[in-house]
Image (tube, coloured by chain):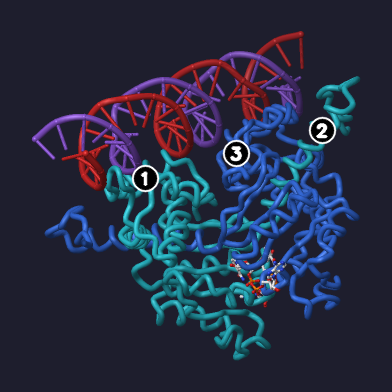
Chain colours: A cyan, B blue, C purple, D red
Amino acid sequence: MATGRNHRPATRSRGIPEATVARLPLYLRALTALSERSVPTVSSEELAAAAGVNSAKLRKDFSYLGSYGTRGVGYDVEYLVYQISRELGLTQDWPVVIVGIGNLGAALANYGGFASRGFRVAALIDADPAMAGKPVAGIAVQHTDELERIISDNGVSIGVIATPAGAAQQVCERLVAAGVTSILNFAPTVLSVPDGVDVRKVDLSIELQILAFHEQRKAGEEAEASARKGPDGDMPAVMPA
Amino acid sequence: MATGRNHRPATRSRGIPEATVARLPLYLRALTALSERSVPTVSSEELAAAAGVNSAKLRKDFSYLGSYGTRGVGYDVEYLVYQISRELGLTQDWPVVIVGIGNLGAALANYGGFASRGFRVAALIDADPAMAGKPVAGIAVQHTDELERIISDNGVSIGVIATPAGAAQQVCERLVAAGVTSILNFAPTVLSVPDGVDVRKVDLSIELQILAFHEQRKAGEEAEASARKGPDGDMPAVMPA
DNA sequence: CCATCTTTGTGCACGCGTTCACAAAGACAT
DNA sequence: ATGTCTTTGTGAACGCGTGCACAAAGATGG
Ligand SMILES: NC(=O)c1ccc[n+]([C@@H]2O[C@H](COP(=O)([O-])OP(=O)(O)OC[C@H]3O[C@@H](n4cnc5c(N)ncnc54)[C@H](O)[C@@H]3O)[C@@H](O)[C@H]2O)c1
Ligand SMILES: NC(=O)c1ccc[n+]([C@@H]2O[C@H](COP(=O)([O-])OP(=O)(O)OC[C@H]3O[C@@H](n4cnc5c(N)ncnc54)[C@H](O)[C@@H]3O)[C@@H](O)[C@H]2O)c1
């Protein structure tokens, strides 16, 4: 059993830096919006503003894909949408299974943003026998017993875990054993996976704690600025026995 | 109106690198689990394995907080839990509002992981008049008209946006104007906020697209390995007119 | 055809984050 | 007290990501 590697293979895939890959979906979203407004071309400056990034960074990102711009004009919106989609693998269909159809899993199943980008919910899976057969978002929930068959029959390579934390590792192992090689984990646990399997995590609690850290810092600075006297420094609190 | 800065102030807050701050919640979770099992001390090696990170990185992270370990023994679990909690600002209560009580917003409201770490759902807010007064997760949903009063009355500084993308920027502006300085955004949009406001985003669609990229790459490598003949190289596809 | 103007593509420098490797610190046994 | 053994804390090297700044490319107008 490999030790739980975080995510990010750190290997530069096909010469495209991981940081760039993470921004491509952002560019794609901005470009899709432009496309819907029938804007023919866009400059790196405009697109960068729409995506909320530095324009030099955006140009460098695109340079990894190839020279798709025209100097003095900008980028052809439609063409760029196609190129990024192709690079991200969105020109093909990705069947996805969601495991754990509770509050969150049901919300994910109902989420329209899935289908819009080539992702298709192939099955909803839950361990609760009472859930089996019940339709969620128009799809009948299937029991965990069927997991391996579902993965195999549908050629699923991407799985979403929305079970309680305690069940996540076990579910993960079954998914991987059945052939899944990419996992999006919503459960607050570190998943151990063999090499070759990618795991990305979404953790609400972590995000909030990061915000709280900065929030506290802001409050501290404010207090320091208003009451500019007797800063007691960094003395650590009492050390327990 | 400031241009939509992504997130991460890039400024090193109180000497603690942003990358370290992002890992502290991970360590805290692992430590809490150890604490519940009444484990008194833990070595950097063990804790690093539990958190899924390199042990040298973990030690360096902790060194930013101070010298809380004992050489030859390890770290006192309880003490470390306290120190990290304090550093993250989790020793105080953070009232949070959730705006947009649809599929996702309701799931978030029902999520137990909120309260467990000092975050308290102070109010649920939705624009739909039909939702007003309805209880979700034991809390009555309030109408958007009340937003400013709710923020002010409860001293809320952290807001969660779970509205459709089209409404997110407007909701964001109202939150900020009312005094919110940290925002967790689930809507797939780039939010523009003034300096001093932190935004973090959770985007399911982006995570899936990143997974799809690597998945495609794996499939490509596999095909290349099996059929080792006539690699047509990196010739770009047909250029549209 | 030439001049001008816009915008791309990228060389380069810098800073942050990661990891190795090891000296110093302390526990523990004798 | 002394020696051994474990584990921390950190100096140093390295690699990745970011952003500046500019030359080259091409459009556009005369
Ligand atoms: N609800 C949220 O907003 C939210 C936010 C962040 C993280 N999370 C995390 O997401 C996960 C799900 O949250 P939730 O609120 O939907 O919980 P939930 O209890 O509502 O749903 C969990 C579902 O998983 C099913 N399940 C349990 N064990 C299973 C197994 N072995 N195989 C398949 N299915 C199994 C249960 O039957 C249940 O339907 C939890 O780990 C939670 O911490 C939730
Ligand atoms: N459901 C998911 O799993 C999921 C996943 C990722 C991202 N998202 C994003 O999260 C957001 C919410 O998703 P959802 O599935 O819950 O959508 P939803 O349509 O079920 O819920 C949206 C809610 O927001 C309310 N609303 C609309 N405008 C508002 C305003 N101006 N002020 C306050 N409330 C307002 C609506 O009344 C509705 O109750 C969307 O932006 C979606 O793209 C959802």
Residue that numbered label 2 is attached to:
A222
Indicate which disc residue B19 carries.
3
Which corner quadrant of the image does residue A127 belong to?
bottom right
**Tag 1 subunit:** A
Q: Quadrant of the C terminus of chain B?
A: bottom left
Q: Residue at the location (74% across, 75% down)?
A: B128
- Local secondary structure at mark 3: helix
In the depicted view, which residue is nearer to us: D16 or A31?
Answer: A31
Residue A197 shows up from this direction: no
B100 is higher (above) or lower (below) than A132: above
Question: Is residue B33 left or right of B211 when viewed as pictured?
Answer: right
* Chain containing mark 3: B
Position of residue A149 measured from the top left corner of the image (x, y, whole percent): 45, 82
Q: If the picture is divided into quarters, which one holds ligand 1?
A: bottom right
Mark earlier in primary sequence (1, 2): 1
Q: Which residue is mark 1?
A: A12
Q: Is residue B78 left or right of residue A159?
A: right
Secondary structure category for the residue under label 2: helix
Q: CA distance from mark 2 to mark 3?
A: 24 Å
Say which of A230 and A174 sits in front.
A230
- The type of residue carrying mark 1 is Arg
